[in-house]
């Protein structure tokens, strides 16, 4: 076990013209506590895990000159630290922990293929393929034979002045530029577009993804499974804060990494997600994806599967949090006319904390409870397009049921 402290203090005291003592200069302090590695362990490629905790403070204070502060000629040295901003909120939530555990499970499998979901939804695939094929065949048939009135209007050569000198391609291009074509396209254009968007997002795209990931899972099942796997997730938030007319740039970095060591290679049921019926049940539940827009329910069950399906020998969690703030300058709008503040832009604080700990696998029966997603995730462009498509589809279904 090692416990230590390192300090580097280059600060000096200065008394300004008002008789107030001010501090300027650089200051550094690092404290740590953790277990030691032997000389032999230090030479290994994969060093043994060990608990560790560290705290680092790095700061610098640069004084600035207040000029004409309360009246003409009222000049004196001052420190921006007199107007420190409030601490910015750490952006990390339980949703990030759920995503971290989900990624750990996918990395342990070396595949994201979910066999239980695929089996639960595979009965819909033939109907979806038949529906797409039927629509394509119908369109191609009408294009070839001109049986549809709209297509006839679109592809029919117009016997107008100068039309004999136009090629078929030029006629089609001319018709596309005509607003009459879009008027003749029919009243159901928005309905068809909405149906196609949803079919692609929640039908075709997942089907293509399943085809790729299933091949990766098959490759994983015939190869040697690694006993060491790791995954990490990182989030960064940056914000500008204003306090008493002084502008500070503030930033919080929160990075968490989990290393998991398997006691044995996962079996086929685990690799193919066939022992995760709860996740499959959520996927086949109607409108579950809409709920997932607001609260990541699917991530919760994926994280639960990671904790329960694998035989973890040990789990190690490393958390890195860095808070920094830099003084930028003065907002003159809050001062009296003629008052200024020059300098001080070298003033900054940076506080870093690092903690590596071994997780108690016996106490990890359940993952953390998910929280409501941020508004920018709920109201993303993709979600808004899907929501509009859903509303159009529901309006059409209601109208048809009422025979409108």
Image (tube, helix red, strand yellow):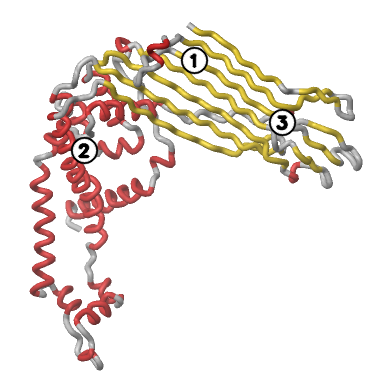
- Image check: 140 left or right of 307? left
Above-or-below relation of 41 to 242: above
Q: Which mark is residue 286?
A: 2
Which residue corresponds to the image point at 33% horizontal and 16% vertical from the top-left?
A: 315
The mark that comes first in sequence, 2 or 1, is: 1
Residues marked 1 and 3 touching at CB (< 8 Å): no
Which residue corresponds to the image point at 24% horizontal and 52% vertical from the top-left?
A: 393
Q: Which mark is residue 53?
A: 1
Q: CA distance from mark 2 to mark 1?
A: 46 Å
**Which is more toward the observer, 51 or 286?**
51
Q: For the view shown, which residue lies furthest in the top direction?
A: 1
Q: Considering the numbered disc 3 on the image, is that residue within a helix, a strand or a loop? A: helix
Dot 1 crowding, Cα within 10 Å, few <14, some 14–19, many 20+: some
- Image check: 96 left or right of 11? left
Q: Considering the numbered disc 2 on the image, is that residue within a helix, a strand or a loop? A: loop
Location of residue 303 (image quadrant):
top left
- Image check: 274 left or right of 250? left
- Image check: 289 left or right of 96? left
Viewer-side label of 3, 2: 3
Q: CA distance from mark 1 to mark 3?
A: 31 Å
Q: Considering the numbered disc 1 on the image, is that residue within a helix, a strand or a loop? A: strand
Q: For the view shown, which residue lies furthest in the right direction?
A: 73
Q: Which mark is residue 337?
A: none
Residue that numbered label 3 is attached to: 83
Which residue corresponds to the image point at 34% horizontal and 20% vertical from the top-left?
A: 46
Above-or-below relation of 342 to 51: below
**Which is more toward the observer, 37 or 204?**
37
The mark that comes first in sequence, 3 or 2, is: 3
């Amino acid at each position: 076990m090692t416990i230590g402290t390192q300090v580097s203090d280059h600060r000096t005291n200065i008394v300004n013209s008002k008789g107030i003592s001010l501090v300027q200069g650089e200051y550094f302090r690092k404290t740590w506590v953790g277990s030691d590695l032997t000389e032999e362990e230090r030479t290994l490629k994969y060093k043994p895990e060990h608990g560790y905790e560290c705290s680092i403070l790095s700061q610098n204070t640069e004084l600035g000159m207040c000029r004409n502060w309360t009246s003409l000629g009222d000049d004196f040295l001052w420190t921006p630290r007199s107007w420190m901003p409030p601490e910015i909120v750490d952006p990390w939530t339980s949703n990030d922990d759920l995503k971290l555990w989900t990624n750990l499970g996918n990395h342990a499998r070396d595949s994201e293929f979910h066999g239980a979901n695929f089996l639960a939804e595979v009965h819909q695939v033939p109907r979806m393929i038949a529906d797409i094929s039927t629509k394509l065949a119908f369109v191609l048939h009408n294009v070839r034979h001109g049986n549809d009135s709209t297509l006839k209007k679109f592809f029919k050569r117009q016997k107008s002045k100068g039309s004999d000198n136009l090629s078929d391609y030029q006629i089609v291009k001319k018709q596309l530029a005509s607003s009459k074509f879009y008027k003749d396209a029919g009243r159901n254009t928005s309905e068809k577009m909405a149906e196609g968007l949803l079919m692609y997002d929640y039908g075709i795209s997942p089907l293509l993804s399943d085809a790729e990931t299933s091949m990766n899972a098959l490759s994983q099942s015939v190869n040697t499974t690694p006993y060491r796997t790791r995954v990490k997730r990182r989030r960064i938030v940056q914000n500008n804060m204003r306090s008493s007319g002084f502008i500070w740039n503030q930033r919080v970095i929160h990075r968490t990494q989990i290393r998991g060591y398997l006691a044995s290679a996962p079996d086929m049921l685990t690799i193919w997600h066939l022992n995760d019926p709860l996740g499959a049940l959520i996927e086949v539940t109607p409108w579950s994806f809409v709920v997932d827009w607001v609260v990541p329910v699917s991530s919760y069950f994926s994280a639960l599967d990671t904790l329960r399906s694998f035989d973890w020998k040990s789990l190690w969690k490393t958390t890195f949090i860095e808070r920094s703030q830099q003084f930028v300058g003065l907002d003159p709008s809050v001062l009296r006319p003629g008052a200024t503040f020059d300098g001080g832009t070298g003033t900054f604080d940076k506080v870093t904390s690092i903690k590596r700990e071994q997780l108690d696998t016996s106490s990890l029966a359940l993952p953390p409870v998910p929280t409501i997603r941020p508004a920018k995730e709920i109201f993303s462009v993709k979600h808004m397009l899907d929501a509009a498509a859903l509303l159009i589809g529901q309006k059409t279904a209601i109208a048809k049921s009422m025979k409108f």
